[in-house]
Image: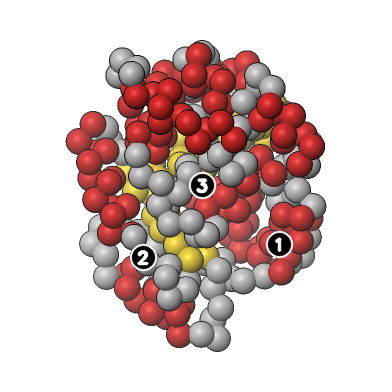
Amino acid sequence: MKVRKTKVICFANNKGGSGKSTTCGNVGYGLTQLGRKVLLIDGDMQLNLSLSFFDEERVLEFAKGGKNLYEGIKRQEDLTGYIVHSSYDNLDLIPSSTLMSSIEYELFTKWQREYILKKCLENIRESQGYDYILIDAPPTLGGWVMNILCASDEVIIPVESTPWGLFGLGNMFEFLEQVKQIVPELKVGGIVITKVDTRKNYFKQTFAALKQLNDVKVFDTYIRVDSSIEWSQDNNAPVMAYKKGSRSAAEYMELAGEIAGVPDRDT
């Protein structure tokens, strides 16, 4: 039997509102439904990924306590001890903290600062306890996002299907080229289009524009606007767990299959 190596994927876009955290969390849950073990890492001070699985009181507990990503990175410790178990099988999380807003300052004076997250994840990767580690990056371009990218095998870029969805994407690709000078093995896993309203021309325009990009995959699955997503967020749950029969649950399941290379959901 072939042993799967732990794959690290980050979800990044320097534009806020792209559906990045929502996609990261729902893909993570979807992968568990395909029989994979998943560790989610909330790298954003907004705590949205953490709130996708725990209520606000619990998330603030993590943020104010010592068991969060900020503390682990600040101390440059093995992050194994910062993992918390979610209520879902095979799905764990390293929660974030509002103090992540000052992580750039913490990293600034450190030796080989671009590789700190990678080193902190070393033991988790080598233990092969997870099939996937999914990291939600903040909507910025800087030293911390570079850290996340240097720790990743590939990056997936969610892009919202709105008139402003493509804004700043050029900056994102320029930044990725800089990162690839440090980690040339980093791959762009693809672009996933989110917040799609097929009745509007924005989707067709966005899809056509993205298809013109050279050597960049656009996932076949796109995520349409669906109130079930907002309700699931309000209930601190992935949409597949909150409303399995919803359109968005099916779409995120298809996307998870595409990412895992199992488009027919055959595990």
Residue under numbered circle 2: 167
Residue under numbered circle 1: 230
Q: Nearer the viewer, mark 2 or mark 1?
A: 2
- Residue drawn at 59 percent across, 35 percent down: 98
Q: Nearer the viewer, mark 3 or mark 1?
A: 1
Crowd rating for badge 3 (residues with CA inside 10 Å; few <14, some 14–19, many 20+): some
Q: Can you give x and y, in whole percent of width and height, for residue 147 in the image? A: 38, 31
Viewer-closest of 181 and 264? 181
Q: Quadrant of residue 109?
A: top left
For residue 144, say whether it is visible.
Answer: yes
Secondary structure beneath dot 1 equals helix
Q: Quadrant of residue 129?
A: top right
Crowd rating for badge 2 (residues with CA inside 10 Å; few <14, some 14–19, many 20+): some
- Residue drawn at 38 percent across, 79 percent down: 205
Q: Amino acid at mark 2?
A: Phe
Query: Alpha carbon of mark 2 to alpha carbon of mark 1: how far?
Result: 24 Å
